[in-house]
Image (spheres, grey):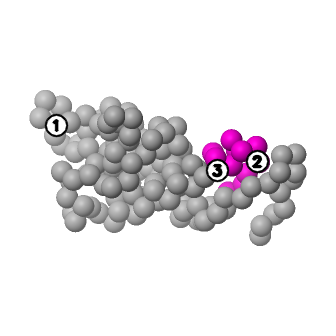
Amino acid sequence: MSDISTDYISKELLVKAMAGLGTLVEKALLHPYETRSLSVEYDLVLMNPNNGDERIAFNNKNGRWRQEAIDINCAGTWTTEVSKLIQNRYFMFEQQQKMIEGGWDTGIVELENGMIEEVHAFPKNTQPRSLH
């Protein structure tokens, strides 16, 4: 088993980043065919809605949510794509949160595939213009 290098600190932002990318469950197995006595139960598991065998797991270790997977070279297309989306979305939601904490209203430009392209900040009480 190998760790993916990205650490996530906020469970709330991590769950938000995974929203809509698959089926999210808590306290589940990474490998659906293992028995609970032989495997590790993960804090959060995101499953491909079209193939429950494809999963990405996260455990909270010392205040950081670490993504874990079996040999990354064996990862399927869905797993690889969704891992990249989670990284992008988490980072952008983190930036958005900082802008909100700084007193700004925000808007997000999200692509069809779920990738977040931009986060915009607007002074409070201002209506953002349409970007399209």
The extreme right residue here reads 126
Residue type at mark 3 is Gln
Which is more foreground, mark 2 or mark 1?
2
Q: What residue type is labelled 2?
A: Trp
Mark 2 nearby-residue class (10 Å; few <14, some 14–19, many ≥20): some
Camera sees residue 96: yes
State the CA–CA distance, disc 1 to disc 3. 37 Å
Residue 51 x/y as whole percent: 33, 53
Task: Give the left or right position of residue 127, taking residue 60 as reference.
Answer: right
- Do we see residue 23 in this rendering? no
| Residue at numbered disc 2 | 104
Name which residue type carries label 1. Answer: Ser
Residue matched to label 1: 39
Position in image of residue 59 (x %, y %):
32, 38
Image-based side of 87 in relation to 54, left or right = right
Q: Residue drawn at (72%, 59%), measured in percent from left and top?
A: 120
- For label 1, the crowd category at 10 Å Cα-Cα, with few meaning under 14, some 14 to 19 and many 20 or more, is few
* Residue 117: quadrant of the picture: bottom right
Q: Please give the residue where the numbered disc 3 appears in the rendered image.
A: 96
Boundaries of the magenta span: 97-108
Residue depicted at 80% across the width and 54% down the height: 122
Of residues 51 and 96, the one nearer the viewer is 96
Mark 3, other Cα within 10 Å: few <14 / some 14–19 / many ≥20 = many
SS at badge 2: strand
Q: Is mark 1 on a helix, strand or loop?
A: loop
Residue 119 pos. (x, y %): 66, 58
Which numbered circle lies on residue 120?
none
Q: Could you tell me if the residues under marks 2 and 1 are in contact, i.e. CB atoms within 8 Å?
A: no
Give the alpha-carbon distance from disc 2 to disc 3, as whole Å: 9 Å
